[in-house]
Image (spheres, rainbow, N blue to C red):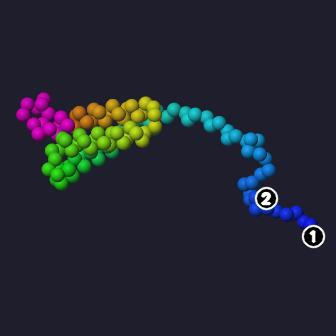
Amino acid sequence: MGGKRLTVRGRSPGWSERPYSKRRAGRPRRPEPPRPVLDLVAALTSLVLAVGGALFFGLEMLGAFKLPLPLGYGATLILLGAACLVSARRGWPRRVTAVGLAIALVAGVVMLSPGGPPWLGR
């Protein structure tokens, strides 16, 4: 009754007798091809969502804390912009989003200011 003794490792499907140094390394992956249209759509979508979210939260802060709308909008957009920049991949879509958020911040604060835009002559 001297059959082959199987150990726990010998029955494991992922176990092999090869030493770690001789295991095959993972194949190097090719870099992703550039997708400028998809990246631009993603950047514009994130910009629209950030501006919409900033307006929503600015109005909520106006009602809850009596904070002026331009101040609440600006503070929220700065926080959302920082979160977008931290979480986005590196590359030109990130820069497009950053520039768009900066333009939206300045334009939004000017448009939402109590006197309105200065070029309307109010």
User: Which of 110/33 is in front?
Assistant: 110
Dot 2 or dot 1, earlier in sequence: 1
Whole-percent x, y for residue 58 in the image: 22, 47
Q: Residue beneath label 2, please?
A: 10
Of residues 14 and 52, the one drawn nearer to the viewer in this rendering: 14
- Residue 41 screen position, x and y as percent: 41, 38
Give the quadrant of residue 5.
Answer: bottom right
Name the side, left or right, on which 96 lies relative to 110. Answer: right
Residue 115: x %, y % from top left: 10, 37
- Disc number for residue 100: none
- In the structure shown, which secondary structural element does the residue marked by tag 2 occupy? helix
Is 49 part of what is drawn in magenta? no
Q: Quadrant of the C terminus?
A: top left
Location of the N terminus (image quadrant): bottom right
The residue shown at (82%, 62%) is: 6
Give me the C-alpha separation between circle 2 and circle 1: 20 Å
Q: Is mark 1 on a helix, strand or loop?
A: loop
Residue 79 is left or right of residue 5, and the answer is: left
Q: Residue at x 27, y 32 (%)?
A: 103
Q: Look at 17% across and 49% down and name the residue there.
A: 62
Q: Provide residue 93's location: percent of width, then percent of height.
A: 42, 34
| Residue plotted at (22% across, 37% down) | 108
Q: What residue type is labelled 2?
A: Gly
Name which quarter of the figure residue 109 lies in.
top left
Visible residue check, residue 121: yes
Q: For residue 37, say whether it is visible.
A: no
User: Is disc 2 surrounded by few (<14), some (14 to 19) or many (20+) residues within 10 Å?
Assistant: few
The number of discs equals: 2
Range drawn in magenta = 109-122
In magenta segment, residue 117: yes
User: Where does label 1 land, which residue?
Assistant: 1
